[in-house]
Each structure stands twice: as structure tokens, then as C-alpha cells.
Image: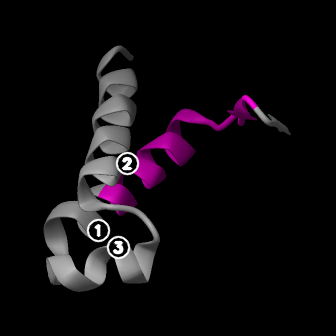
Amino acid sequence: MKIDEEGAELRVSKDELLMLNNALNEICNGVHIHEDAFQTRLAFERSDLRALLAEISGLLSQT
């Protein structure tokens, strides 16, 4: 793992990436968290997490 001012680099297995994908999907689309509470509870806006979910889903679809 590498982290610096420019970002972080993390190596995960395909199964681990699938776990992250599923967890983000559940947070963004499954459990109901009211918009007003979403950013307070998760420190990010739902749109930010959905963008990350789209990136991860895109990677998974390439395999």
C-alpha cells in the first residue's frame, strides 16, 4: 500500500474489489439513509460514493 499527498495506491484481489463494490452499492442504493444525514454519517455526499461505485463496477466488468 502506498499513500502520499497525491493519493493512495492499494492492491486488492478481485473478490475484495467485489466486496467493496457490494458494500458501496448497499450504502448508496440499499439501506435508507436520509440525504440530510448521509454526509454527516459518511463524511461524503452520496454522489461521491456513487462515482466511486461506478469506477469499481467498471473495473469489475472488464474481467
Q: Quadrant of the C terminus?
A: top left
The residue at which mark 3 appears reads as 39
| Mark 2 → mark 1, Cα distance in angstroms | 10 Å
Q: Quadrant of the N terminus?
A: top right
Q: Earlier in the sequence, mark 3 or mark 1?
A: 1
Q: Which residues are magenta?
A: 6-24
- Could you say where residue 62 lies in the image, as x and y percent from the top left? 34, 14
Mark 1 lies on a secondary structure that is helix
User: In the image, what residue occupies the spot 23% across and 62% down?
Assistant: 28
- Could you say where residue 32 lies in the image, as x and y percent from the top left? 15, 82
Residue 27 visible in the snapshot: yes
Circle 3: residue type = Gln
The residue at which mark 2 appears reads as 21
Q: Earlier in the sequence, mark 3 or mark 2?
A: 2
Against 59, residue 17 (above or below) is below
- Could you say where residue 58 lies in the image, as x and y percent from the top left? 31, 24
2 vs 1, front mark: 1
- Could you say where residue 38 lies in the image, as x and y percent from the top left? 29, 77
